[in-house]
């Protein structure tokens, strides 16, 4: 069965610190990879996505992620976090089948940035 | 504005009751998916509707059912509510043959007491 693992459940950083959130997935077929962010009280928003091509993808708000196929990983990074980055971050895998597609989400990483 | 509208935003029900949640997809989207997000967890896929039929289903019991209307809007019905059904229910819309772009609604917070 497909699964997505986020190993960091809660991360606390000071402003300007660098961020890296881990994401590993298990799925034998072709996948598309995503990172979503959920700010307190708000809906899930897409940060970035990887379909194919350059394994280093850039998203909104200075976030980037690197797809390493051999490691089944898609880690999220940001060189310098801001207080406004405090949120829940979800890694997701989209597996397309003959009948449609669905997302598999990780359990999320709660990021708290201290001013 | 998320583009996907869900109603109601909050709901409190008693065990054993039935509930209906509603979702209007983003304009131009034809596929609706429902997810359950329990506290401290990632969203779990319930099912997906396209052309008014359930196309895929996650690991949820038959108490969870749905419907899609000709205008692509959708309902999620849960019968015989359990305390464990308390969660945030998310609706996401997409294009069946699109670029996998999902747009999520803000969700309905269901509390079962």
Image (spheres, grey):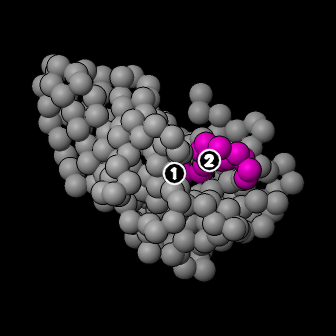
Residue beneath label 2, please?
Answer: B100
Left of B12 or right of it: where is A67? left
The label shown at residue B47 is: none
- Residue B103: image x %, image y %? 60, 41
As drawn, A108 above or below A3? above
Furthest-right residue in this view = B70
Tell me the quadrant of the picture where the N terminus of chain B can be found.
top right
| Front-most of residues A73 and B4 | A73
Q: Residue at x 34, y 49 (%)?
A: A68
Q: Circle 1 — which element?
A: strand
Neighbour tally class for label 2: few under 14, some 14-19, many 20 plus, Cα within 10 Å? many
What range is drawn magenta here?
Answer: B90-102
- Confirm whether the magenta stretch covers residue B96: yes
For this view, does B87 lie left or right of residue A100?
left
Q: Which of A4 and B27 is in front in this view?
A: A4
A71 in relation to B61, above or below: above
| Position of residue B112 measured from the top left corner of the image (x, y, whole percent) | 44, 64
Relative to B12, residue A44 above or below? above
Proximity of marks 1 and 2: CB atoms separated by less than 8 Å: yes
Q: Residue at the location (70% across, 45% down)? A: B98
Task: Give the secondary structure at mark 2.
Answer: loop
Which residue is pictured at 51% across the width and 56% down the height?
A31
Disc assigned to residue A32: 1
- Main SS category, magenta section: loop
Which subunit holds the residue at mark 1? Answer: A
| Residue at screen point 76% across, 36% down | B27
């Amino acid at each position: 069965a497909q699964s997505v693992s986020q190993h960091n459940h809660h991360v606390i950083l000071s402003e300007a610190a660098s961020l890296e959130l881990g994401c590993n997935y298990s799925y034998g077929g072709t996948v598309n990879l995503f990172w979503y962010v959920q700010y307190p009280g708000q809906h899930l928003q897409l940060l970035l996505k990887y379909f194919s091509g350059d394994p280093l993808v850039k998203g909104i708000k200075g976030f980037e992620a690197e797809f390493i196929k051999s490691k089944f990983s898609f880690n999220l990074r940001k060189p310098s976090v801001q207080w406004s980055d405090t949120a829940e971050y979800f890694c997701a895998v989209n597996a397309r089948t003959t009948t449609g597609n669905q997302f598999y989400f990780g359990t999320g990483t709660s990021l708290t940035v201290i001013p | 504005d998320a583009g996907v509208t869900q109603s109601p935003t909050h709901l409190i029900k008693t065990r054993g009751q039935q509930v209906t949640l509603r979702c209007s997809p983003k304009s131009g989207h034809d596929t609706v998916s429902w997810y359950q997000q329990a506290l401290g967890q990632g969203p779990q896929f319930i099912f997906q509707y396209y052309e008014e039929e359930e196309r895929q289903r996650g690991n949820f019991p038959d108490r969870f059912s749905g419907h899609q209307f000709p205008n692509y809007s959708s309902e999620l019905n849960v019968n015989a509510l359990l305390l464990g059904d308390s969660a945030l229910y998310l609706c996401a819309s997409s294009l069946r043959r699109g670029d996998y772009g999902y747009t999520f609604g803000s969700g309905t917070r269901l509390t079962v007491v």
